[in-house]
Image (tube, rainbow, N blue to C red):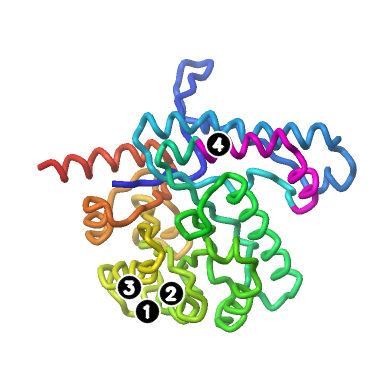
């Protein structure tokens, strides 16, 4: 059974008044574009930010292993402003060794690593600069995964959405324009309004890029297909890769089920409903599922306990 934690690791923090809250213990530092362009960041500081962020990943890996978590989504902000500092990054021998060390630790721990670049990574845009920037973003992510020693397959998924509605041909062209190390890891995720699972199938047929199925998104944009059929069809797109299909799971925040579109999209802190097809797939260990819940590892551990209890009955 493989449930994935997304980008953070929450741990308890006791405030001055004695109350306890859970905060992200991964101290990922960032950089602001405006300040960078204004020359506010010396190269030594930028380098320190990058080293810190990989060291924070190294620090969380033993926690994943100790809690039997076998999938982790690496933050797409690991190297902020990568596109402006790629030369420095790729020439930094210390940074490369840290990435190699982290990759080896993930592999030895049996942990699948994926990433999910942000909403501005759009290969189907009408704007050529947007597409060029998306290609660069995905190429940079692929370099990180290469350096970490991850396979050049969707097992180490670089996951994106279809992007601009009704631009299938542009999406296919964008995928084909990627270098092999990015294209061979790419997955396409169905979304709530623009690209259903069925909308993405022609892109899969044209490029071989599999579908990372999101069951929550499917409930908004199902193209007339039930959950079980959709789950199976998405899994079919992974047949040739020799690894388990990657899927996503989240729920609407309790109390918002009858709300408007925006309210129903909001993720709950914990998982209170899992489609039967994903439950069965997890119990049978034939899919990997990233849990997109606000409580992060706490939600994963709670759900894992529930599924293990059902499995052992």
The residue singled out by tag 4 in the image is 102
Whichever of labels 1 and 2 marks the residue nearer the N terminus, that label is 2
Whichever of labels 2 and 4 marks the residue nearer the N terminus, that label is 4
> Is residue 296 positioned above or below 157 on the image?
above
Residue 61: x and y in percent read 48, 33
Q: Is residue 101 magenta?
A: yes
The residue singled out by tag 3 in the image is 233
- Name the front one of labels 2 and 4: 4
| Residue at 45 percent of width and 54 percent of height | 266
Q: Secondary structure at mark 3?
A: helix
- Name the front one of labels 2 and 3: 3
The residue singled out by tag 1 in the image is 223
| Residue at 66 percent of width and 31 percent of height | 52
Q: Nearer the viewer, residue 270 or 6?
A: 6
Residue 100: x and y in percent read 59, 39
Whichever of labels 1 and 4 marks the residue nearer the N terminus, that label is 4
Q: Are marks 4 and 3 in contact (CB under 8 Å)?
A: no
Whichever of labels 4 and 3 marks the residue nearer the N terminus, that label is 4
Majority secondary structure of magenta residues: helix
Viewport quadrant of the C terminus: top left
- The Cα atoms of the two marked residues, 4 and 3, are separated by 34 Å
Badge 3 crowding class, 10 Å Cα cut-off, few under 14, some 14 to 19, many 20 or more, is: some
> Is residue 123 positioned above or below 265 on the image?
below
Part of the protein shown in magenta: 83-104
Number of numbered labels in the structure image: 4
Horizontally, residue 111 falls left or right of residue 44, namely left
- Name the front one of labels 3 and 1: 3
The residue singled out by tag 2 in the image is 196
């Amino acid at each position: 059974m493989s449930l994935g934690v997304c980008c953070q690791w929450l741990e308890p923090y006791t405030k001055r008044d004695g109350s306890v809250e859970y905060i992200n213990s991964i101290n990922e530092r960032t950089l602001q574009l405006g300040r960078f362009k204004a020359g506010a960041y010396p190269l030594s500081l930028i380098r320190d930010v990058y080293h810190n962020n990989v060291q924070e990943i190294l620090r969380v890996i033993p926690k994943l292993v100790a809690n039997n978590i076998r999938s982790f989504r690496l933050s797409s902000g690991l190297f902020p402003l990568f596109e402006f500092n790629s030369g420095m990054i790729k020439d930094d021998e210390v940074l490369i060794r840290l990435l190699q060390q982290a990759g080896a630790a993930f592999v030895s721990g049996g942990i699948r690593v994926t990433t999910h670049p942000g909403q501005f990574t759009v290969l189907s845009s009408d704007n050529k600069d947007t597409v060029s920037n998306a290609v660069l973003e995905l190429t940079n992510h692929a370099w990180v995964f290469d350096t970490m020693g991850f396979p050049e397959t969707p097992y180490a998924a670089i996951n994106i959405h279809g992007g601009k509605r009704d631009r299938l041909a542009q999406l296919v062209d964008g995928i084909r324009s990627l270098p092999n190390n990015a294209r061979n890891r790419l997955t396409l995720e169905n979304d709530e309004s623009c690209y259903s699972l069925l909308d993405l199938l022609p892109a899969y047929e044209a490029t071989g890029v599999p579908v990372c199925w999101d069951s929550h998104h499917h409930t908004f944009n199902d193209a007339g297909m039930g959950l079980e059929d959709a789950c199976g069809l998405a899994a079919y797109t992974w047949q040739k890769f020799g690894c388990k299909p990657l899927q996503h799971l989240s729920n609407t925040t309790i109390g918002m089920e009858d709300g408007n579109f925006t309210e129903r999209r909001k993720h709950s802190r914990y998982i209170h409903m899992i489609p039967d097809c994903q439950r069965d797939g997890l119990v049978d260990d034939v899919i990997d599922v990233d849990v997109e819940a606000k409580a992060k590892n706490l939600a994963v551990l709670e759900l894992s306990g529930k599924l293990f209890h059902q499995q052992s009955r």
